[in-house]
Image (cartoon, helix red, strand yellow):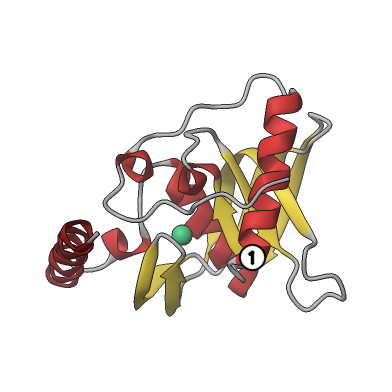
Amino acid sequence: MAILPIRQYPDHVLKKNAVPVEHIDLEVEKLIEDMGETMCAAKGVGLAAPQTGTSRRIIIIGMSGQEKPEQFIELINPQIIMAEGEELAEEGCLSVADYKAKVRRALKIKVSYHDKQAIQREMEAEGIIARILQHEIDHLNGLLFFERLSRIKRDLIKRRLIKRAKHNNSAS
Ligand code: NI
């Protein structure tokens, strides 16, 4: 297992539409293990494969509050098949360090996905778990949380992040 570097906006891999997983092979299994270790090390509650540089449709969500913090659920090729209600709450992202914003999301969702044994499953979620799932599935479609804000807020955050990325590059 390995802790992978987490890609930061405006890295191009974060803007791509990720590719569906056709076969769950050793490479996919290893990626999921590494994503788990990476999320745990970063103290995240969710992670999408593109954030670790691999443009494939895999997300994991943490089981926070449980005894073993390293436990997580993997969802392969996840798809939202039902969404209802609405909720505005604060979000951040491991790929957008130090920024948080209130994002409007569905309150309740149902997701279909494949597990590691390639079995088709469904998950219903509400509140914070539904929010994490929507945030991570957005990553598979090349969307970051601040892109769901009003245009003014979105452009302001983008400008600051790009400025910061340039500054960091010239400093290293
Ligand atoms: Ni994120």
Residue at the (77%, 64%) spot, across then down: 70
Residue 27 left/right relative to 171: right
Query: Regarding mark 1 in the picture, which secondary structure is present there?
Result: helix
Of 84 and 92, the residue lying toward us: 92
Residue at the (75%, 58%) spot, across then down: 72
State whether residue 108 appears in this view: no
Residue at the (72%, 36%) spot, across then down: 30
Residue at the (78%, 70%) spot, across then down: 69
Would you identify the image quadrant in which residue 65 lies? bottom right
Residue lying furthest top: 22
Q: Position of residue 79 (x, y in %)?
A: 57, 41
Of 77 and 86, the residue lying toward us: 77
Q: Is mark 1 within 8 Å of ligand 1?
A: no
**In the rendered structure, which amino acid carries the disc numbered 1?**
Ala
Of 34 and 142, the residue lying toward us: 34
Residue lying furthest front: 172
Quadrant of image for the N terminus: top right
Q: Position of residue 128 (x, y in %)?
A: 60, 73
Residue 139 left/right relative to 4: left
Can you say whether 55 is above or below 150 in the image? above
Number of marks: 1
Quadrant of image for the C terminus: bottom left
Can you say whether 130 is above or below 19 in the image? below
Would you identify the image quadrant in which residue 58 lies? top right
- Return the residue at label 1: 41
Q: Position of residue 25 (x, y in %)?
A: 74, 22
Can you say whether 161 is above or below 2 in the image? below
Q: Position of residue 29 (x, y in %)?
A: 74, 34
For mark 1, does the 10 Å Cα neighbourhood hold few (<14), some (14 to 19), or many (20 or more) residues? few
